[in-house]
Structure formats: C-alpha cells, structure tokens
Image: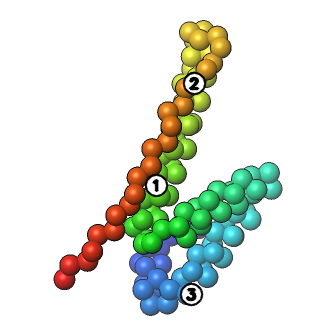
C-alpha cells in the first residue's frame, strides 16, 4: 500500500467526513492484514491513539500527544534493550530498573494571527 500525501490532504480539506471514513477503513484494513496474534495489540494501540486524538483540542495537540506516546514507548524499549545487554554482558545479574516518573505538561494553543 502506498500513501499519497496530496490525495489524503485534498480529501481532508474538501470532505473531512469522507477523510475520516477512509482513515478508519484504511487502518482497519491494515490491522486486519496483520497476523491474528498481533491484531489485539494493534487494536489496543489504535484505541490509545484515537483516545489521544479525542482528548486534544487541535490536530497539532493530537500530534504532540501521539509523539509523546511514541517516545515513551521508545524509551521503554531502549531500557529493555539496555537491561538485556547488561544481562548478556554479565555486568548485572539481577535487573532492576528505576523508572523515572512520566512528566506532563499543559499544551497551550497558539492563536492564529492574520
């Protein structure tokens, strides 16, 4: 499947409802094409993404929230990789990680100037 930015962008501008329908159909088709054992996890991830989008007051706010989700997940994956590397190198027999608490911030929308 190829992604045509111009087509999606035009659809979003011209017909937001059709864009949303097509977005949902495309996501569902992609999840359905995954192996059955991965589908529940993908549906759970999409649910989290959709909730972050619904909690945001703007598309940019949604993008920031989803980006934060991605980096949080990356940080957890990196920590697991570091723990595995330490275990394999024999530098740490019992893996214990102190997770830093997640930081949060209020997103302040900028007013458009014309």
Q: Which residue is mark 1?
A: 67
The label on residue 5 is none
Q: Which residue is mark 2?
A: 97
Secondary structure of residue under mark 3:
helix
Q: Is residue 36 above or below residue 112?
A: above
Q: Is residue 46 above or below residue 26?
A: above
Q: Which of label 1 and label 2 is nearer to you?
A: 2
Would residue 41 be found to the left or right of residue 1 on screen?
Answer: right
**Marks 3/2: CA–CA distance:** 46 Å
Residue 64 visible at all = yes
**Marks 1/2: CA–CA distance:** 24 Å
Q: Quadrant of the C terminus?
A: bottom left
Q: Nearer the viewer, residue 45 or 102?
A: 102
Q: Residue at x 20, y 78 (%)?
A: 113
Q: Which residue is mark 3?
A: 18
**Marks 3/1: CA–CA distance:** 25 Å
Q: Which of label 3 and label 1 is nearer to you?
A: 1
Q: Nearer the viewer, residue 72 or 100?
A: 100
Q: Earlier in the sequence, mark 3 or mark 2?
A: 3
Q: How many marks?
A: 3
Q: Quadrant of the N terminus?
A: bottom right
């Amino acid at each position: 499947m190829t992604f045509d930015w111009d087509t999606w962008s035009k659809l979003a501008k011209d017909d937001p409802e059709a864009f949303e329908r097509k977005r949902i159909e495309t996501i569902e088709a992609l999840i359905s094409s995954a192996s059955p054992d991965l589908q529940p996890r993908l549906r759970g991830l999409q649910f989290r993404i959709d909730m972050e989008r619904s909690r945001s007051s703007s598309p940019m706010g949604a993008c920031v929230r989803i980006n934060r989700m991605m980096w949080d997940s990356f940080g957890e994956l990196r920590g697991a990789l570091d723990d595995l590397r330490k275990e394999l190198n024999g530098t740490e027999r019992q893996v214990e990680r102190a997770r830093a608490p997640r930081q949060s911030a209020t997103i302040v929308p900028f007013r458009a100037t014309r």
